[in-house]
Amino acid sequence: MREIVTIQVGEFANFIGSHFWNFQDELLGLASDPESDPVFRNHNLDMDVLYRSGETQQGVSTYTPRLVSVNFKGSLGSMSARGTLYNEGSSSRSDSSKTWVGDVDTQRSEPRKRNLFLQSLYEEEDKVGKEKAREIEDKDIVGCLDEEVECWTDFSKSHYHPQSLYELSGLWTDSQDFNNYGIGKDVFSEASRGEELCDRLRFFVEECDHIQGIKFLVDDSGGFSAVAADFLETIADEYTNIPVLLYSVRSPMSQMNPRSSKKTVSNKLHDAISFSRLSSFCKLFTPIGLPSLSESKASKFLNLGDEKPYRSSAVYAAALHSSTIPFRMQPTSSDSSEVSNSMDVNTLIQLLTGRGRQNMVAILDSAMPAPTLAGKQLENTLLTDLQALTPEVTEDVEDNQAIESMCILGALRSEDKEASVSEVKNAVDASYEQAITKTKPLFCNLSVSRCPLPIPLPFPSIFGNLVGRKGEILSSPVSDSLYRGSLDVHSIPVVARWRSSSAILPFLESRMMNLEKLGIQWGAMGSDLVRTWGFGREELQEMRENLSKMVSELNPQFLESSDSD
């Protein structure tokens, strides 16, 4: 067994996670459906890597994600913090009120009403509600989700273990007010929250036979960055031999231009300190979140709304799923006809960080849907369609020391024909050899799975009218509708690529320079602010030194110019 434990901290991280677990739930359902496409029934993916088997007190078998999710109190919508499978119930009073001998005044808000999707999901499992569930049509469910999603549980089709969903007790703060590192700096240590979170993580880790790593997603646009950094520091102390893959994620709406210079300074210092702290407790750091997906190449065949996290998080979740598929491929003595080149977390880390340059900040690219393999212009499509989901990177940088790891899911040979593993390998080799405008990387690893990304019912209607039922790119529009969803598109091919490249330099340099200019220099505009966040000058200088080392790994000239200064 090569288990992975997943941690999701913050609102947007949980939006991405909700889509991610929906994909896994859909794969599980299709694998057991005798009428589904054989490519799903024989996907050669080990779902035990992400899931645990269990049993309720009533003896009912369960299969739930190995997950710890962290968010505000009240962020679960209509879902109970104990999940939906284990109904042992919990006391209506908090632990602190049990020791109180005086009068207790209990105030409760009205429980949130389930939307049509959740009504149909849970009423199908209830004998009384089955008839009512049949009356709810899928088209009405899809329509309601596009309009009514407010929190990540509104579209979640997965069941969760009682240890998985953690609400930060006493923290009802709106996400717009929880918007900088300083606000979250004491949250982890207060009110036994840190101990409780570590206990929950320990529950999942200690039942693993051979854990390969921790996948950690954090919405680092505000105070959750500090919560995650303290959590990661504890993990680094307690689990020294377990590698952590860290994704810092941001929604487009969290990156809107601030209205004041004071807020601009705060944001820039937050970015520098957040990155410095988070990157010091992981083996591989991958920033995800463009200021605008709708203005990027990702929108070539998709209709994306930056203002809705339900939509933007779906694109990032698809890339997350696709890039981590090699960790779940069934290891075989030789590549099978369904998958090729499995790897574990540590192998990926060594590949990207251990060859030549010691760069631990990776770029994640994606093409969704992936182009078909047929056609003379493939070499200009497969590579040029890849969109960097990592912000502040240089486009089309020439870096002959770059290291890449690419994963292709469900590639199509033509509009209606699935490609074999060998056909995908040959096409990728040809695309790199024939590309005129791109320098070939020093090393490129390729993993292939013939299983495409399944599109579950609650997936947002983001596909354009040139995307067909299997995610193929059509030569002419299939309908007048600009928005197609899970009722029209059942699966899509996806390409995801990790890159260790000097293209990440603008991301690193901006954080290094902002920390120096706004936080460290004498008379810096933000020096008082970072002091209120709990950082002294020496600690900031140490952060700056670490950032300088990261920049010099990718740009040796920077170190030379610094020495001459």
Image (cartoon, rainbow, N blue to C red):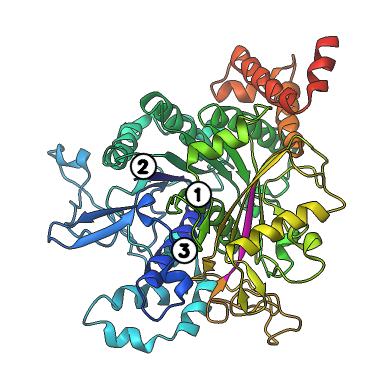
Query: Compared with residue 516, is residue 389 higher up or lower down, i.e. above or below?
Result: below
Residue shown at the point (39%, 55%) measured from the top left:
46
Circle 3 residues within 10 Å: few <14, some 14–19, many ≥20:
many
Decide which of tag 2 and tag 1 comes sooner along the chain: 2
Q: Which mark, by number, is residue 342?
A: 1
Whether tag 3 and tag 1 are in contact, CB under 8 A, the answer is no
* C-alpha distance separating marks 2 and 1: 43 Å
Front residue (pair 97, 307): 307
Q: Is residue 148 magenta?
A: no
Q: Is residue 495 magenta?
A: yes
* Side of 109 relative to 362 (left or right): left
Give the residue type at disc 2: Gly
Circle 1 residues within 10 Å: few <14, some 14–19, many ≥20:
many
Q: Does residue 17 show up?
A: yes
Q: Position of residue 331 (x, y in %)?
A: 43, 50
* Side of 150 relative to 82 (left or right): right
Q: Which residue is mark 3?
A: 23
Q: Which mark, by number, is residue 170?
A: 2
Secondary structure at badge 1 equals: loop
Q: Does residue 565 show up?
A: no
Count up the numbered dots: 3
